[in-house]
Image (spheres, rainbow, N blue to C red):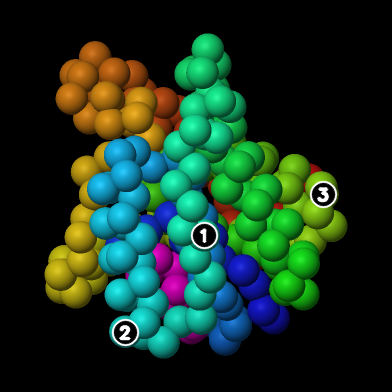
């Protein structure tokens, strides 16, 4: 099976790529992250991703456009739903490209992060799957969270300190928002298994 794997950054790619390789899944990585702020951060993550992909001979596609304007136009005045719109943009584009290029499914390294809204990710991925008539390949990559951290440190990869958008950068410095984020993460229910997504 060949899938298009959306990659948010180099460190978050390590564990998911290892899982897919281990199960014999052919994959192409796709760097598409219009939410990242500022531009220097965008470049750091893109460069780190490309260096890792080149060193491990992963197939990849990079969207080098800095899409901050597009992202902000979607979320301004709807900041509380910014993750929803961010997931829609990234997963929708990944599903569309996967269908166009003849892949048999798509997935994302966002499923690796313990800081993402996992249930919302699954919901938006299921919607993208329906919209573009291509299966969403689900894995709960969070089980390898510490393993991925350890490996990224061993590889000397640049490790970012916030999710990516302007608002998550603010949360990095705002203790009140940090507490709210922690409560959100704790309330996120862990899904039961991996495989083809059944939530659509």
Instruction: Please give the residue where the numbered disc 1 appears in the rendered image.
Output: 63
Q: Nearer the viewer, mark 3 or mark 2?
A: 2
CA separation in Å, label 1 and label 3: 23 Å
Whether residue 139 can be seen here: no
The magenta-colored residue range is 13-22
Q: Are marks 1 and 2 in contact (CB under 8 Å)?
A: no
Q: Secondary structure at mark 2?
A: helix
Quadrant (top left/top right/bottom left/bottom right) for the C terminus: top right
Does the magenta run of residues contain 18? Answer: yes
Q: x, y percentage for residue 120?
A: 58, 36
Residue at 30% from the left image edge and 75% from the top image edge:
51
Tell me which numbered mark, 1 or 2, is placed earlier along the sequence: 2
Q: Is residue 80 left or right of residue 130?
A: left
Q: Quadrant of residue 124?
A: top right
Answer whether residue 157 is magenta in the image: no
Q: What crowding class fits label 2: few (fewer than 14 Cα within 10 Å), some (14-19), or many (20 or more)?
A: few
Marks 3 and 2 close (CB-CB < 8 Å): no
Local packing at callout 1 (Cα closer than 10 Å; few below 14, some 14-19, many 20+) is: few
* Distance from the alpha carbon under mark 1 to that under mark 2: 19 Å
Q: Is residue 77 left or right of residue 148?
A: right
């Amino acid at each position: 099976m060949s899938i298009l794997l959306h990659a948010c950054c180099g460190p978050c790619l390590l564990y998911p790529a290892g899982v897919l390789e281990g199960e014999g899944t052919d994959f192409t990585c796709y760097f598409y992250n219009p939410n990242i702020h500022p531009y220097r951060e965008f470049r750091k993550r893109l460069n780190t991703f490309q260096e890792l992909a080149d060193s491990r001979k992963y197939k990849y596609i990079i969207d080098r456009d800095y899409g901050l304007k597009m992202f902000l136009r979607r979320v301004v005045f709807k900041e509380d739903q910014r993750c929803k719109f961010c997931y829609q943009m990234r997963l929708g584009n990944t599903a569309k490209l996967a269908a166009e290029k003849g892949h048999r499914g798509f997935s994302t390294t966002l499923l690796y992060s313990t800081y993402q809204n996992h249930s919302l990710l699954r919901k938006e991925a299921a919607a993208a799957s329906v919209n573009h008539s291509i299966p969403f390949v689900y894995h709960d990559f969070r089980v390898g969270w510490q393993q991925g951290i350890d490996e990224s440190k061993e590889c000397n990869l640049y490790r970012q300190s916030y999710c990516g958008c302007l608002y998550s950068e603010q949360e990095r410095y705002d203790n009140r928002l940090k507490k709210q984020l922690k409560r959100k993460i704790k309330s996120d229910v862990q899904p039961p298994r991996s495989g083809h997504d059944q939530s659509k």
